[in-house]
Structures are given as structure tokens and as C-alpha cells.
Image: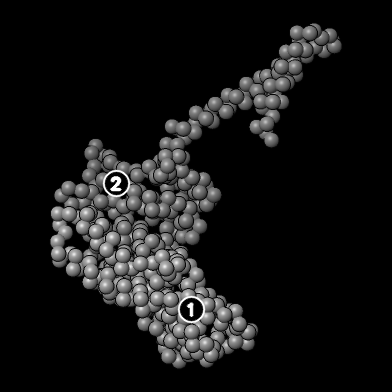
Amino acid sequence: MNIANSHRLSEECDVLSLVLAKEDEASIHLVEFRSVMLATLRSLCPKDWDTDHEVAWNWLWENIERMLKALWGKPRIYQHALDLFIAGLSDEEVDFFRRELYKRFFLNAPAGQDHFKQSTTRLYFLADRVVETTSDMFKRPRKMVQEISGLGLRHVGYGIPTEMFSPYVSAAVDTVAAISTDDNALAGFRWSLTLVAKILVRAVGEGATLVMRAINTNQELAMRKALAIAPRGQRAMELLNISVGTQSISPLFWAIQSGALHSARAMIVDLLTIRADRDVYYYGCDELFTRHPDIIHRLCKDAPTLLWTLLDGLLWRSRLTFQAQRRVNYYVKHLVQDLDGKSSQTLSWLAAHQDPKVIVHPVVVMFADLIWSRLAMYHFLLGRCYFLFAVCVFVTSQAVLFRHDGSESMEENIARFACRCFLYLASMPKLM
């Protein structure tokens, strides 16, 4: 619970009211829950619990109970009226809603035209999703909260300001008011869409980090400035994971997916830069491949120009020389095996990419030679030896055990039969 944040507390109570609306009202006893929860908290913290904690808990639950009772029974009424309204919409009313929504929105917020540059078909799809989301919020509140949180994180990547949500909601409600004559349907639509907007605004606010804002600029300098204030131990997670509730997004993958390759290059360079303080070395290689085991595959498909940058980061050369040589470290663990300890598909991804410059990179050559000398060579030689043995058996059955004078013996026929059985049953299936 977010007690200090009244807006978040109100949002949680609204969602809780939707969840409780799915249950039998006669089986819900809020007063008894307060007493049971109070006894549970007191037993969990017997040494620290005192009267101040008891007063605080009673105050909190009284506020929650007041918010829940204010909505008691309304979600079911809203859902029924809204479902009837949506089911009764004609094609003309649907088209009117689609057109009027954006007409009112652009009138209330002209700056919104800079963010809605998609085709008319896409805008109409978004309008339809607005109506579907308001209905689904009553039917599947838990799942919808997760989906809306994920949608809010994507809005962070799109660079949508939170000031646009309120005019959009107002335009949608005014448009429905022009169509519907049912007050309950209008109230349910307004309440559900307002709750969706609250969740979106919170998700955008929590996910709008300096890194995500720098991605929208697609400038390496802006990304370096955003990371300059981050502690060494947290830089990797700020580049690889942003969480809102149970949903998360990777800023690095978002930069690659959105085409912000300058920002993505700066992020990869920062992740694979070795830093240190008095006690600990910091190197984001493990965090990168743990969060994104398929980073090589993704770069081969969406950003091949960043492959060389990534591979350079897996190579460290000492600045000191000894006997005209420098020490070089290759960090190829995650290129050889995956997180489960099985063989990684990195080499097959690079081979399918068919880039001769990447395939001769020192890191690729190093781990390819390592795989060949420690593993693949023995299997290859064993396979060649088996093939040579099969050739010898074939020659024996076709030439050595064959007489040109036409005479045959029982022993030769049995040996020839055994050789051909071996060829047909043990060698031929490998060719099929």
C-alpha cells in the first residue's frame, strides 16, 4: 500500500473495489478484516508493536473502508450499463465516436497532433481499444492493471507527455455523452477510463527515467549525461531494466527497437566499460547477457552496426607491455554457453548473419577456436572415423567378398549379409 501517496492509495482502492465486485457481497466483512489483520500484525511484530502502530493501522483501514464503501455496489451497475451501451452501438455511432473523439481532443490539446501522426485506420483502432479497455477493466481488473502498466512503459518510450491523458479522457467522455442517454453507462465509462488514465500516468511517471528521456533524443552526449550521475553499482540495471509493478521494460532493447542506435551504442559502451572503486570492479557483461541472452541475435536482426561495438566491449587490452607483449582478456563465457549451461547459439547466429567483417573479429575467432578445439573437433573426428569404417565395410561387402568366377560359400554369404545389414540399418538412416 502507498499510504503517503493519496492518489496511489485512491487508485489501489478503485482496483480493489473492482476485484471485490466479483465476489459475493454477503461474504465480505470489512470490519472483521480490520480486527483480524490487527491481531495478525500484532503477532508478527510483538516486540515493536505499540499503541502508535495500532492507531496508525486503524486510521489507514478507516480511510480504505470509507473509499471502498463509497463505491460499494457501483461497479456491477456500471459494468451492466456499459455492456448494454457498447452492445447497442450502431455502425454510424461507432464512426461518430471515432471521428468526434480526435476532433474534440485536438481542439482541447492542439499539441496532441504532434504525437498522433499515424494513419486514420490506426487512430480508429486506438479509439476502439479505448472502449474495449473500459469494459475489460470491469471484467478482468487484475490482468488489465498489468497490461495497462506495460502500455504505460511503452508510452515512456514513445515520449508521450502525461499532460495529454487528461484532454484525451475528457474528449472521450464528452463524445460518449453525446451518444448515450444512460447516466449509468456514462458514469461507468467515465469512472473506468479515469482509472485507466491514473494507472497510465503513474506508469509513465515511474518509468520516465533520465535514460528513457535520453533515448528519445537519440544522442550519445545526452545518454552519457544521463548516466553520469548514476552510481557504479546501479548503472547496469538502469540501462537494462525499468519496472512498474509486475511489468518491466529494457531501455537497451527499446532503443534498438525504436531505431535510436546512437543511444544504444552509448549504452553498450557504458555497460561494457570496466570501472572500479577501492573494493569492487564493475563490468556489466554478466548483467547484459543475463537480462538479454539473445542480444547477439537481436543485434544481427535489428542493429548489425552495433555488433562490432558489442564485441569490442568483450575484449580488454592492457595498457602496459612486458617483453613487447600486452595482456589481453577475452570475456567469452556467455558466447560459449547459455544461462542453463548448455551450448550457446551465438556462433550459428553469426554464421547466419553472413557478415565477413564480424566473423573475423578477435572475440569471434577466439570463442570459435575454443569451441572447435575443446568440443567440436572430437565429435567431428569421431564422425569421420565412423564414416571411414562404413566405407571399409562397404568395400568389403562389394569387392573383397565378391568372386568373379561366380562361386559362393555359406560363410561369405553370411558375412556379406551382415555387412549390408550394417550399411542399411546403421549408416543409411544418417543420410536420410
Q: Could you tell me the amino acid type at mark 2?
A: Arg
Task: Answer above or below: position of 238 versus 60.
Answer: above
Residue closer to the observer: 174 or 156: 174
Q: Could you tell me the amino acid type at mark 1?
A: Ile
Name which residue lies at 53% across and 90% down: 181
Residue closer to the observer: 118 or 324: 118
Image position, residue 226 (x, y; %): 28, 67
Label 2 SS: strand
Look at mark 2 in the image and give the residue it sits on: 317
Task: Answer above or below: position of 149 versus 324.
Answer: below
Determine if residue 169 is in view: yes
Image position, residue 268 (x, y; %): 35, 58
- Asked whether, in this view, residue 303 is left or right of residue 283, the answer is right
- Asked whether, in this view, residue 369 is left or right of residue 325, the answer is right
Q: Quick one: which residue is furthest to the right in this view?
A: 406
Name which residue lies at 39% across and 67% down: 28
Which quadrant: the N terminus? bottom left
Q: CA distance from mark 2 to mark 1?
A: 69 Å
Label 1 SS: helix
Residue closer to the observer: 140 or 103: 140
Determine if residue 150 is in view: no
- Quarter of image, res 390: top right
- Which of pointers 2 and 1 indicates the residue nearer the eye? 1
Between discs 2 and 1, the one toward the N terminus: 1
Name which residue lies at 35% across and 60% down: 241
* Marker disc for residue 319: none
Name which residue lies at 65% across and 32% down: 430
Look at mark 1 in the image and give the residue it sits on: 77
Task: Answer above or below: position of 301 versus 2.
Answer: above
Which quadrant: the C terminus? top right
Image position, residue 358 (x, y; %): 46, 50
Image position, residue 2 (x, y; %): 28, 68
